[in-house]
Image (cartoon, rainbow, N blue to C red):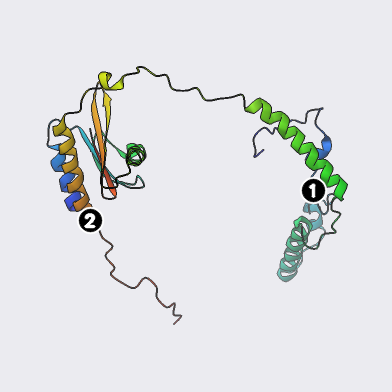
Amino acid sequence: MGCCYSSESETTEQDPDERKPLIPHPNPDSKPLNGTEWSSASVPSARTDEQALLTSILTKTALNIIDVSAADSQGMEQHEYMDKARQYSTKLALLSNSLSQKKPLPLPSLTSQPHQVLDLVPDLDVQQVSKIAAYAYSAISQIKVDAKEELVVKFAIP
Amino acid sequence: MESTLEQHLDDTMKNPAIVGVLCTDQQGHILGCRGSLSDEHGGVVSVLVRQAASLTRDPTDSPTVCLESDLGNILVRAHGTHHSSCS
């Protein structure tokens, strides 16, 4: 699905109410318009065809739209809401216990005296790199925005 | 206008001891690269320098980060707001 620890399979220990959608489908029994409805209109004019097509699109859309504002709010009652919240938090607590046991492994330390193991970087190299960096910086400062024309223009319809 | 930078990178590569050079801005966006250093190294390089800079309070003291390996060293340094690295 879209989040961690969820799966498609419905396990028996899960409360079936857990996955019940909060906003019910507005018209679950609607059947999509099929071919038989079209054939009943025998040789209609092109105008009526368009009209029928338009109304079918409208009805399909109206059936599929879930209007959240106008819907009959059979919202959950307070106790149901509290129940669900409690259920989820206990589940989370259970899961977080098992999750927190995975700790990242610390990097192994090879030596306690790195300055003896690592080579001294030659001064010349460091100086050279500083010079290269300085030249690069001055070269980059030449890269500028070259404004040739107005960025914002009036949109004119002739 | 980028020709100066391109020329500078080419000149740097003329040095036989240098097998790669890379230049990025503060966010790791590649401004130019040659040789053994390429696009995918830009992010790592800029972050290393930024982290190293936080080791010192002095803002003018720009450290040079050196990554040592048996194949060679990679030196990374920031100048102003840009980072260059040579390997």
A20, above or below A65, in the image? above
Mark 2 crowd level (few <14, some 14–19, many ≥20, 10 Å Cα): few
Tell me the subunit letter for badge 2: A
Tell me how many marks there are: 2
B13, above or below A99, in the image? below
* Residue located at (86% from left, 54% from top): A74
* Residue located at (80% from left, 31% from top): A14
How far across and how far down the image is residue A127, in percent?
Answer: 15, 38
B19, above or below A72, in the image? above
The quadrant in which the N terminus of chain A is found is top right
Q: To which residue does mark 2 refer?
A: A141
Tag 2 and tag 1, C-beta contact below 8 Å: no
Give whichever of B62, A100 is nearer the camera: B62
How far across and how far down the image is residue A4, in percent?
Answer: 64, 35
Tell me the subunit letter for badge 1: A
Examine the image and state in which quarter residue A21 appears. top right
Answer yes or no: is residue A8 visible.
no
Disc nearest the viewer among 2 and 1 = 2
How far across and how far down the image is residue A93, in percent?
Answer: 72, 32
Mark 2 and mark 1: span between their CA atoms?
A: 58 Å
Left or right of B16? Residue A33 is right
The quadrant in which the C terminus of chain A is found is bottom left
Q: Secondary structure at mark 1?
A: loop
Answer yes or no: is residue A32 visible.
yes
Give amino acid for label 2. Answer: Ser
Which residue is the extreme one toward the front?
Answer: B57
Q: Secondary structure at mark 2?
A: loop
Give whichever of A72, B45 is nearer the camera: B45
